[in-house]
Image (cartoon, rainbow, N blue to C red):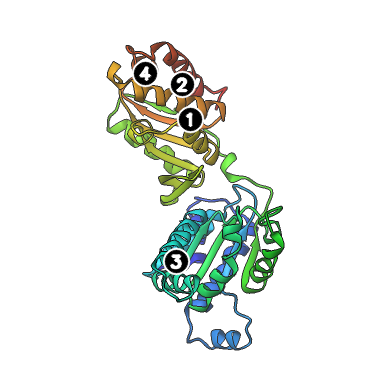
Amino acid sequence: MKSPLSTYNDYLDKNLIKVDDQQKLAIQEIDTFLSQSLNKSSSIYLSLKKRKKLPKGVYLYGEAGVGKTMLMDICFNSIDIKKKKRIHFQEFMIDIHNRLHERRKSKVKADPLLSVGREVASEIKFLCFDEFQIYDIADASIIERLFTILFEEGTIIISTSNLKPTKLYADGLHRDRFIPFISFLENDCLVINIDNGKDYRKNRVIDGETYFSPLNDASKESISAMFKKFSNGLPYSEKTLFIKGRELKIEKQALGCARFNFEDLCGKPLGAEDFLSIAKEFDFIFIENIPKMSPEKRNEAKRFISLIDALYDNKNKVFITADGEPEELYVKGDSKFEFQRCISRLHEMRSKEYL
């Protein structure tokens, strides 16, 4: 497999991304770190380890849209390790707390966190966290020791965050107990800031159609081409949104773009809060296979109205494949009156003024 730096250079050569000096410096640093960390028999690795100069992980931070997740995904996809995992940080911590709960229920006398940390390290040797953030004391109280265990067991961690280490868990309960972890991060990890004042996700111009109908191979090819364009051809990855303790998995997303089937959003018991979370998380929303809805599909129609309201209010750019024009999607049913607003917004959202 290619190295992360080689993959990044390929993206540049193919004009999938624009030249960005800070991104380039960051991927060079990470590439060197991974090369040294994974080649444990090299003289450089042994020398650095002896002098305790070798970082054990990477903490990559910067504002939204500067390319943190893209760089992490390049690393994840480039590294040839079977035991690797890419996961949202909050999802990871939920799993940790669930494992700790099971250990405590078993009444085994062994140290629960040490046992769980070693178990996770045996399962994962290359761990990528998206959106590293500490929200509560339960995570803050165990994170330093958990990372220490993972590092001692040989797990390499790459994290992305919008916050520099000193801003983590700001104003949190008993933050004084969390301060040592900040020093731990700064001392044991390669901390890289790629703030460049650019939000690449917001600088993409739409100069073509966004609504494709009817449902056929041509419309499918068109929306696929638009997704490829606005995601810069990057591969899909999963992402999990956390909404008041619930998990909402986004199976296809890349570079601020999310791709859904109509049934994934409107055929399931999702509500306005879910749709608003999606709208805020992504800039470009792709919805495929919207059918003509019969009166019996009143629930799907109501969810679709709520979805379009959320996307419209948030000014998202929306790409659609549908079985007909907006006026044809729901002509009879309990929500026909409310659907008129949806029709109007669907037309406006494909206009040059909106885009």
Dot 2 or dot 1, earlier in sequence: 1
Whichever of callouts 1 and 3 sits on the residue coming sooner in the sequence is 3
Q: CA distance from mark 2 to mark 4?
A: 9 Å
Q: What number is the disc on residue 104?
A: 3
| Residue found 45% across the figure and 28% down from its top | 307
**x, y percent for residue 282:** 52, 40
CB of mark 2 within 8 Å of CB of mark 3? no
| Residue matched to label 1 | 272
The residue sitting at 52% across, 77% down in the picture is 37
Q: Secondary structure at mark 2?
A: helix
Q: Label 1 amino acid?
A: Ala
Measured in 3D between alpha carbons, the distance from the residue under mark 1 to the one under mark 4, in whole angstroms, is 24 Å
Q: The residue tagged with tag 3: helix, strand or loop?
A: helix
Given the image, on which type of amino acid does mark 2 rest?
Answer: Leu
Task: Provide the residue designation for mark 4.
Answer: 325
**30 or 82: which is nearer to us?**
82
- Above or below residue 121? Residue 176 is above
